[in-house]
Structure formats: structure tokens, C-alpha cells
Image (cartoon, rainbow, N blue to C red):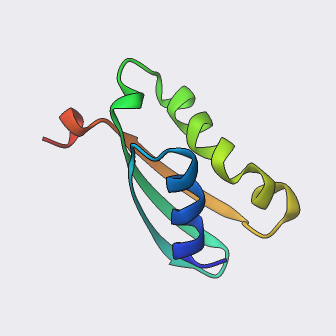
């Protein structure tokens, strides 16, 4: 998979989010910013993002994804 493919998977299912993915060789980092994360624990935030790529993880196509999930206010 490429960072662009992962970014598209997340952005398609979380259209309100700002998504940036970097990395390669099966190991990627996804920086996801969305108001949807407001009031959610880090685990719940990660679950929302993992749900977008669950099929790729289950198939082994995506090996490792580090998620940084923040609200816009947390970036300020």
C-alpha cells in the first residue's frame, strides 16, 4: 500500500477529517484531525480510524499503522 491509498481509505470514511499519511514498506503514520474526536478517549479515536482500514489490516496488506488523532483545538 502507499500513503496515498491509506489516506484515501480514511478520508472516504471520515470526509470531515483532515488526513495526512506518511511512511512506507508496510509501516505508516496517519495524522488525523477532526472535530469528531472531541470528547473521545484516545482508544475510541483510534478505533474510529482503524475501522477505516480494518480490511487491509486483516488481509495483511497493511502491516502497521501509527495513529495520531487530534481535534483542531488540540493542534492550536
Residue occupying the far top of the picture:
39
| Image coordinates for residue 37, horizontal then vertical, percent | 41, 29
Q: Residue at x 67, y 74 (%)?
A: 26
Left or right: where 1 falls relative to 58: left
Hey, which quadrant is residue 56 in on the image?
A: bottom right
| Image coordinates for residue 71, horizontal then vertical, percent | 30, 35
Compared with 28, 11 (above or below) is above
Compared with 3, 55 (above or below) is above
Looking at the figure, which quarter contains the C terminus? top left
| Image coordinates for residue 54, horizontal then vertical, percent | 74, 49
Q: Residue at x 50, y 44 (%)?
A: 14
Compared with 24, 38 (above or below) is above
All told, the count of numbered labels is: 0
Left or right: where 19 falls relative to 1: left
Left or right: where 76 falls relative to 46: left
Hey, which quadrant is residue 10 in on the image?
A: bottom right
Q: Residue at x 59, y 79 (%)?
A: 2
Residue occupying the far left of the picture:
76
| Image coordinates for residue 60, horizontal then vertical, percent | 83, 66
Hey, which quadrant is residue 62 in on the image?
A: bottom right
Looking at the figure, which quarter contains the N terminus? bottom right
Q: Residue at x 19, y 33 (%)?
A: 73
Amino acid at each position: 500500500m502507499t500513503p496515498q491509498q491509506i489516506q484515501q481509505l480514511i478520508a472516504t470514511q471520515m470526509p470531515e477529517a483532515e488526513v495526512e499519511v506518511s511512511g512506507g514498506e508496510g509501516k505508516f503514520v496517519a495524522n488525523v484531525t477532526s472535530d469528531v474526536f472531541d470528547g473521545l478517549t484516545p482508544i475510541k479515536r483510534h478505533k474510529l480510524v482503524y475501522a477505516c482500514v480494518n480490511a487491509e489490516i486483516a488481509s495483511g496488506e497493511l502491516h502497521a499503522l501509527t495513529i495520531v488523532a487530534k481535534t483542531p483545538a488540540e493542534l492550536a
